[in-house]
Image (spheres, rainbow, N blue to C red):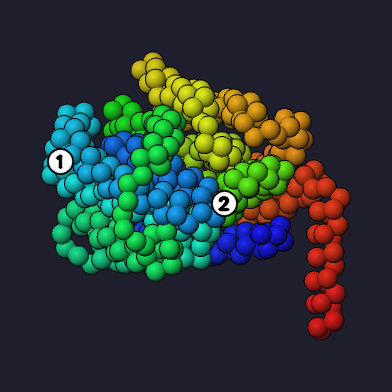
Amino acid sequence: MSSSSTNTRIAKNTFALYLQMLFSMLVGLYTSRVILNVLGVEDFGIFNVIGGVVAMFGILNSAMSSSTSRFITFELGHENLSRQHDVFSTALVIHFALALSVVMIAEPVGLWFLENHLTIPVARMDAAIWVFHASLFIVFFSILNVPFSAAIIAHEKMGAFAYFSILDISLKLAIVYILQIIDFDKLKIYAALLLCTQLVLQTITFFYCIRNFPEVRGKLTWKKDAAKEMSSFAGWSMFGDSAVLMFTQGLNILLNMFFGAPVNAARGIATQVQSVVTRFIGGFQTALNPQIIKSYAANDLIYMHKLIYASSKFSFFLLLILSLPVFFEAEQLLVWWLKIVPDHTVNFVRIMLLISLVDSLANPLIFSAKATGKIKKYQAVLGTLLLLVVPISYLFLWLGYPPESVFVVHLVVTVIGQIVRVVLIKPMINFRLKDYMQFVVFKCSLVLLLAPILPLISYLYINDLVIRFWLVLLCSLFSVLFSIYIMALNKTEKTLIKDFVYSKVRFLGNSQ
């Protein structure tokens, strides 16, 4: 496939994912506010912390998801249909066995942990157990869905992927409406309806894949060599993924143990804001990731390096455009959005946005490591480093530090982890450290230092809240774009932008 047609496909896929992202963002902002108001701070916090407990039992599934996606995409790069069917079929058998295992282990262990170690009001324990069971079944069906979702992304059918995501959001919007009109325990109803949503999406995804992807059709087979490769890859991925889970859901449990459900609600809201903002780079990266793996499979390392640099740099810039005004005006945005803002939420949001900026640089490198399939050393080192987040955070909380301390620990370890990640991946894909520093780190750092100056001045010296908000928003947009143009673009990129702007100006002038 030519570079031109590949770039066109990436552009189309990115556009489809951005349409989905925009719809998801608008609906997500609305539904989050309504759910918080309908459930209340306490029930909202209970739902978040129980979801964290259930997610802990999905560590292996997360690892197998990464393994399945990598191997399906890799075989597509080799264009071997027989091998593609073997990989998909083996992955499906593994995920069915895994789903059953998770339910059998999580049911007794999770209930014991819920009843003995989480801070749940006695009056809400029955609802909490209901949420636990519903969440566990959601995990069961989501595990079964992994091979099908991996096939959709590997084939770069991002339009279908976007439609399914929009359907998911639409069903959750319907749930919000039902919660407001039904007269029953709303926390129980919310969990049950989320389970129904998962069942609907699972069914539609299954039939779409059967119809469109030949490797999905046919008799289920078990290939020992494919299972061995995927299991080995998944084993080391699980070590890295368990570290990620520990400093996300693990921190959620720590906050509950030390501060109770209201702080979990604050963390849940901050996570919602972080999720909304990072979706803007999710579409861009999701469109590029399959090409990173396929270019490695085709041994086109030069193109692979270009994709990594472009994905890293522009993901950072896209995220900065959105996160900078949110960082400054987090408090005002939360008041307008939620009306009820739990304590610590503003600080959580700001620190998590900084973490997301660092993580935006990590994702392209993570996929490049997965493309090689040789992740033993990478996962061992990064996983060990990231696992330190939870014990260090526990120490700070035990010493009496505020809940914000756990996110500061997370930020510091994330920065160190990115440095280690670059050093480890450099020999794996033979990219030059000098090029990465020049094209990614240096340019992103310059923009990050220059862009906040103008909005910071507006934030400090304007007293009227509404005027200040709009001024910070406009200053942030102008400042980031100006900084990118001056500091981050080469002459060719600047010329392309100038020609595009001049052509639009001439078009508008001629149309009048």
Secondary element at image label 1: helix
Q: Residue at x 45, y 54 (%)?
A: 82
Image coordinates for residue 480, horizontal then vertical, percent: 71, 48
| Amino acid tagged 1 | Met
Q: How far apart are the alpha carbons under marks 2 and 1?
A: 50 Å
Secondary element at image label 2: helix
Q: Is residue 450 left or right of residue 416?
A: right
The one of 291 and 495 positioned closer to us in this rendering: 291
Residue annotated with mark 1: 125
Image disc number at residue 77: 2
Mark 1 crowd level (few <14, some 14–19, many ≥20, 10 Å Cα): some
Q: Is any part of residue 395 visible from this angle?
A: yes
Which image quarter: residue 511? bottom right
Q: Is residue 416 left or right of residue 223?
A: right
For the C terminus, the image quarter is: bottom right
Q: Residue at x 51, y 61 (%)?
A: 158
Image disc number at residue 268: none
Instruction: Indicate whether 426 appears above or below 29.
Output: above
| Amino acid tagged 2 | Gly
Image coordinates for residue 116, horizontal then vertical, percent: 17, 29
Image coordinates for residue 402, horizontal then vertical, percent: 41, 26
Instruction: Indicate whether 199 appears above or below 127.
Output: below
Image coordinates for residue 79, horizontal then vertical, percent: 54, 55
Q: Residue at x 43, y 63 (%)?
A: 214
Q: Is any part of residue 451 visible from this angle?
A: no
Q: Nearer the viewer, mark 2 or mark 1?
A: 2
Which image quarter: residue 175? bottom left
